[in-house]
Amino acid sequence: AFEGGMLPHTNAGILGPKELEALRPWNASMGLMLESTSPHLRGRGMPHQHCPDKEPAVRIRMHEDAGHLRIPFTTGMLLGIGESVADRIDTLIVIRDLQDRFGHLQEAIIQPFHPKPGTPMRAVPALRDEEVAGWVALARLALGPEMNVQAPPNLAPEMLELLLRSGLNDWGGVSPVTVDFINPEAPWPALRELRRRTEAAGQRLLE
């Protein structure tokens, strides 16, 4: 039991069923971005060529293991790393099927890739904000009204209202005290400003 403490959310990469089961009593939830179901991304010269933990079947299996263990689980899709439109649709369908089978997915993050200086993918063009909003809308249609659909507000700061109209209902872990460790170059919006713009779009900002 925890008294006055914080309940952890473990997102430690690929874990086997025994590791998931061992962590389960100490975590409120756990997670792993599915990212993409495309095996093409593991091919020669592609982003996941040397990343066996990015193998779609491996990631899907961990989602299934968490489902069998009834672990509340966060998943998501990564946009803009070389996948096709058909790959994105397939990824959403797999997420929907996992939820239909196990009912353990608490949120689906629609995450655009942001190129970083000094990395092999530094020249990859970032997705247009309108395209990200379009995939939020498709995620809402594919995953239904009960799923929490999330997109990070710091990666599309000019498009918050459009994201809200697209079916988003979760801004994710917006923090006034820490950076986005995946995208440190993209500062979080101030909470007061996020609340103002969320309410101006006809929504309520709740913890």
Image (spheres, helix red, strand yellow):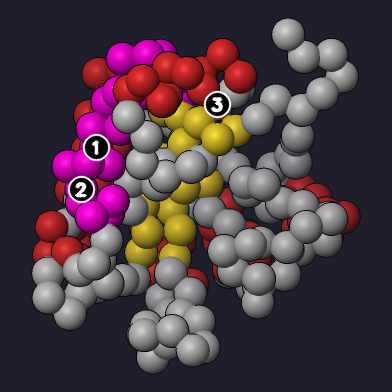
**Residue 74 against residue 153 in the figure, above or below:** above
Would residue 81 be visible to someone looking at this image? yes
> Which residue in the structure is indicated by mark 2?
56
Which residue is the site of mark 3?
Answer: 29
Count numbered badges in the picture: 3
Q: Is residue 193 magenta?
A: no
Q: Nearer the viewer, residue 96 or 5?
A: 5
Q: Give, as a three-letter code, the residue at label 2.
A: Pro
Q: Quadrant of residue 29?
A: top right
Highlighted magenta segment, given as a residue range: 52-72
Structural distance between the alpha carbons of marks 3 and 1: 17 Å
**3 or 1: tag closer to the N-terminus:** 3
Measured as percent of width and height from the top left, residue 70 is found at 41, 14
User: Which of these two is toward me, 97 or 14?
Assistant: 14
Q: Amino acid at mark 1?
A: Ile
Indicate the secondary structure of the residue bearing disc 2: helix
Q: Which residue appears at 67% of the width and 47% of the height?
A: 173
**C-alpha distance separating marks 2 and 1:** 6 Å
Q: Quadrant of the C terminus?
A: top right
Tell me if label 2 and label 1 are in contact, CB under 8 Å: yes
